[in-house]
Image (spheres, helix red, strand yellow):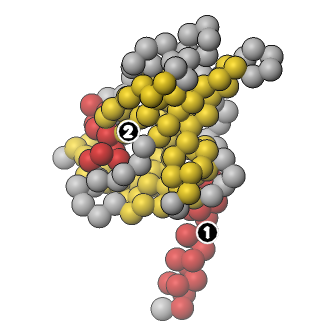
C-alpha cells in the first residue's frame, strides 16, 4: 500500500507539473489553447480582430488543431464534440464570452471571457479570463487528461478523466469528469 501511495503522489506531482507547461508558443491572435495527455498536438483558439483590436464579428473565435510539426488541420467530429465552441456571446466592443462544448456537456459553469485592446505601440493584446478555484484569473491554457482507445492506429474512443484550467500565474483547478465522459465507440 505504501508503494502505491508514493507512486500515486509522484504521478500526481508529475501530472500537475506537466499540466502547467505550455506545449509550444502560440500565435499572436491565440487567446488560449487546449492540450491533452498522450498528444503532442494542441487545439488553438484564435480571435479575429478588426483594425481597432475589437472582435471582427459575433463569431470571431476560430479553432483548429496545431500539430507538433507546425501544420494545422480542422478538428474531426469526435474532437468537435469536446473541443468545439458551444457559444460565443459578444459583450462589448472589445470583449466576448465563450463556452466550450466540454464545459456545457458536463455541467461545468465555466465561461471564458476574451478581451482585446491596443497596447502603447498600437499592437493588439489578447487576454482570456475565467474563474480558477473561485477566483477571477487570466487563463494560460486548459489541459485535458484522457484515455484513448485506438484501432489500427486510429482513435475510436476517448474518455475524459479530468480537465485542468491553468492560469498565467500557474494557479490550477482540476475538475474530474464523473459522467458522460466518453466520446466515440
Residue found at the far left of this picture: 185
- Quadrant of res 154: top left
Which label lies toward us, 1 or 2? 2
Q: Against 167, is 125 above or below?
A: above
Mark 1 and mark 2 residues within 8 Å of each other at the beta carbon: no
Is residue 185 something one can see in this rendering? Answer: yes
Q: Against 6, is 72 above or below?
A: above
Q: Against 81, is 158 above or below?
A: below
Residue bearing mark 2? 99
Question: With 137 as the anchor, is 38 left or right in this view?
Answer: left
Q: Residue at x 43, y 14 (%)?
A: 57
Image location of residue 66, percent across then percent down: 52, 28
Image location of residue 121, percent across then percent down: 80, 16
* Label 1 neighbour load within 10 Å: few <14, some 14-19, many 20+: few
- The answer to which of 142 and 47 lies nearer the viewer is 47
Q: CA distance from mark 1 to mark 2?
A: 29 Å
Residue found at the far top of this picture: 51
Question: Is disc 1 placed on a helix, strand or loop?
Answer: helix
- Quadrant of res 119: top right
Residue bearing mark 1? 13
Question: Is disc 2 placed on a helix, strand or loop?
Answer: strand
Amino acid at each position: 500500500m505504501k508503494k502505491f501511495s508514493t507512486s500515486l503522489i509522484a504521478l500526481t506531482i508529475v501530472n500537475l507539473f506537466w499540466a502547467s507547461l505550455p506545449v509550444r508558443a502560440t500565435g499572436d491572435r491565440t487567446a488560449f489553447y487546449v492540450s491533452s495527455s498522450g498528444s503532442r498536438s494542441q487545439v488553438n483558439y484564435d480571435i479575429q480582430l478588426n483594425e481597432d483590436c475589437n472582435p471582427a464579428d459575433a463569431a470571431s473565435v476560430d479553432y483548429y488543431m496545431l500539430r507538433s510539426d507546425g501544420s494545422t488541420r480542422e478538428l474531426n467530429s469526435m474532437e468537435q464534440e469536446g473541443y468545439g465552441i458551444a457559444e460565443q456571446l459578444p459583450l462589448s466592443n472589445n470583449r466576448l464570452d465563450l463556452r466550450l462544448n466540454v464545459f456545457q456537456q458536463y455541467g461545468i459553469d465555466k465561461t471564458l471571457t476574451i478581451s482585446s485592446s491596443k497596447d502603447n505601440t498600437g499592437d493588439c493584446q489578447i487576454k482570456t479570463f475565467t474563474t480558477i478555484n473561485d477566483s477571477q484569473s487570466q487563463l494560460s491554457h486548459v489541459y485535458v487528461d484522457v484515455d484513448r482507445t485506438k484501432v489500427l492506429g486510429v482513435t475510436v474512443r476517448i474518455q475524459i478523466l479530468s480537465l485542468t484550467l491553468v492560469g498565467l500565474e500557474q494557479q490550477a483547478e482540476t475538475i474530474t469528469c464523473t459522467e458522460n465522459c466518453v466520446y466515440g465507440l
